[in-house]
Amino acid sequence: MNKSFRFLSLLSILIVTFLFYNGIHKNEIDPQTSTHETYKIKALKLPNNLNLAGERVPLEIPDVKERMERELLVNTYWQSNGLLLIKRANKYFPILEPLLKKYGLPDDFKFLALAESAFIDETSNVGAAGMWHFMKATGKEYGLEINSNVDERYDIEKSTKVAAEYLKKSQKRFNSWTLAAAAYNAGNYGVSKRLDEQEVTNYYDAKLPDETERYVLRIIALKEVISNPKKYGFVFENEDLYTLAKTKTIKVDTAISNITHFAKKFGMNYKEFKILNPWLRENKLNNKSRKVYEIKIPVN
């Protein structure tokens, strides 16, 4: 490499470096290209009518207002998660709403189920499972069949019935749906103990575990955002939302030796069958007791 070529190469590098850093500096000070022109983080105005099952959030209490605002901000500006929850809500709310009405639970508790599981088939790190995130012991206590073969925590109707029983029992104990929701997270005993120790009877007056203090307000924030998505900047078309295939129910009172083969009789593969019947945990149904199970299959 001769000297003149090395000089031109060095000169070119210096020119490019100067232009690059000058461009960065220009973008930093040029109002036409600054970030605030294209992306705005807006403070949110809290609606005065925020409530859970008709029980008002007392925003005049500074601590409550700050904590409520935190949950609303998180669920508004964590946009990807918020949009996914809106999409999934459209898929499962039509199933949940009539079940809540059937079992005497306020409609707002569909947002509790969403807060619990995000409507995805995953077990929590402490072993809670299903849409309502029941622990094994609680599910069995309320009559759900839970074993390696069948886990009715994943049966939407049966688990919703149990959730309604638990929450109505808590509401009767505390005379408050808000405290019932808190007890769903911290347990009836845990909430009762805190209320007694602090000599208070209201969720918003109590000092509860951090997770429980966020839990109820997160449910209310989800209710507000998902009920008013465009108000909070979520833009979508109806075809963007998730839906479930129409199904019908068949009853089975015998064992199924191979679910893959059983599913094919109804025009499904194994995966499609398990999406509709997640409570069946293996590729078979033992059913030694000849129990009657209801299995969902596509209408067509």
Image: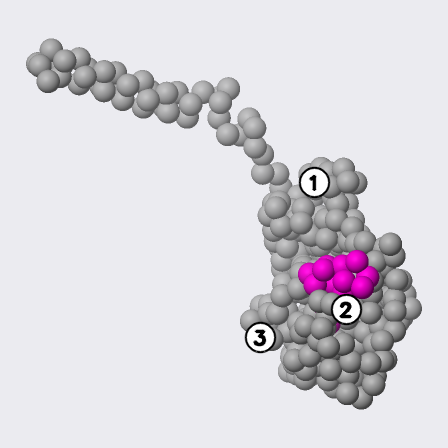
Question: Residue 190 occupies which quadrant of the picture?
Answer: bottom right
- Residue 267 lies within the magenta run: yes
Considering every residue shown, the one lying at the far left of the view is: 3
First to last magenta residue range = 262-279
Foreground of the two, 140 or 22: 140
Q: Which mark is residue 262?
A: 2
Q: Nearer the viewer, mark 3 or mark 1?
A: 3
Q: Quadrant for the N terminus, please.
A: top left
Q: Residues within 10 Å of mark 1 (few under 14, many from 20)?
A: some
Closer to the chain start, of discs 3 and 1, is: 3
Residue 159 on image: x %, y %: 78, 73
The circle drawn on residue 234 is 1
Can you identify the residue that label 3 sits on? Answer: 126
Q: Report which quarter residue 9 is drawn in.
A: top left
At mark 2, the secondary structure is: helix
Residue type at mark 1 is: Phe
The residue under label 3 is which amino acid type? Answer: Val
Label 3 to label 1, Cα distance in Å?
33 Å
Residue furthest bottom as drawn:
289
Q: Residue at x 61, y 46 (%)?
A: 80
Q: Is residue 229 visible?
A: yes
Q: Is residue 23 above or below residue 249?
A: above
Q: Residue furthest right?
A: 102
Q: Amino acid at mark 2?
A: Phe
First along the sequence among labels 1 and 2: 1
Q: Is residue 222 above or below residue 103?
A: above
Tell me the residue at 58%/34% (across/down): 40
Which sits in the foreground, 250 or 157?
A: 250
Answer whether residue 157 is magenta in the image: no
Circles 3, 1 touching at the beta carbon (< 8 Å)? no
